Image (tube, rainbow, N blue to C red):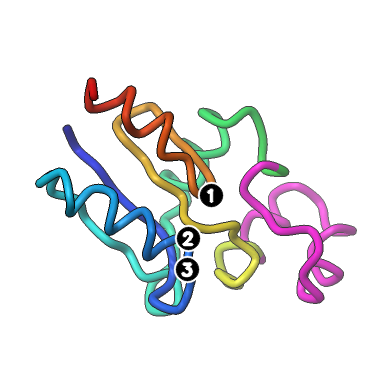
Amino acid sequence: MNLQIFGTKKCNDTKKAQRFFKERGIKFQFIDLAQKSMSRGEFNSVCSALGGMDKVIDTERDEYVNVKYLLPEAQTEKILETPSLFRTPIVRNGKNVTVGNCPDVWKAWIGK
């Protein structure tokens, strides 16, 4: 299992995801979006797995105003520059991805 958790240290749902996997002894890589954004490849992979960018982006944030009227390529660039736009946590297990607190899905991933 190659597990990655993208989130921030201040996000309660990110903390819940980390606790879920720690309690089950499952190793994961934590990527703090406040420190380092996703790469373009990671972002494209996550969006593809979820069925679109709209599942990953928090359109309620004030910063979204600066993004929504841009062309798609410019949108991606601006989103990667503004990690506060991501809904968190983004939990990635290979090609499987969840956004938010999804313990039922995670249990299925680990077979418990």
Mark 3–mark 1 Cα distance, whole angstroms, equals: 10 Å
Quarter placement of the C terminus: top left
The quadrant in which residue 106 appears is top left
Residue that badge 1 annotates: 100
- Badge number at residue 13: 2
On screen, residue 95 above or below 77? above
Under mark 1, the amino acid is Gly
Picture quarter containing residue 22?
A: bottom left
Query: Which of the labelled discs sits on residue 12, or is there none?
Result: 3
Q: Residue furthest right?
A: 69
Given contact means CB atoms under 8 Å apart, are the residues at marks 1 and 2 in contact? yes
Query: What amino acid is found at the position of numbered circle 2 in the picture?
Result: Asp
Q: Are marks 2 and 3 in contact (CB under 8 Å)?
A: yes
From which residue to which does the magenta span run?
Answer: 55-78
**Which sits earlier in the primary sequence, circle 1 or circle 2?**
2
Of callouts 3 and 1, the N-terminal one:
3
Measure how far apart labels 2 and 3 are at the Cα level: 4 Å
**Quadrant (top left/top right/bottom left/bottom right) for the N terminus:** top left
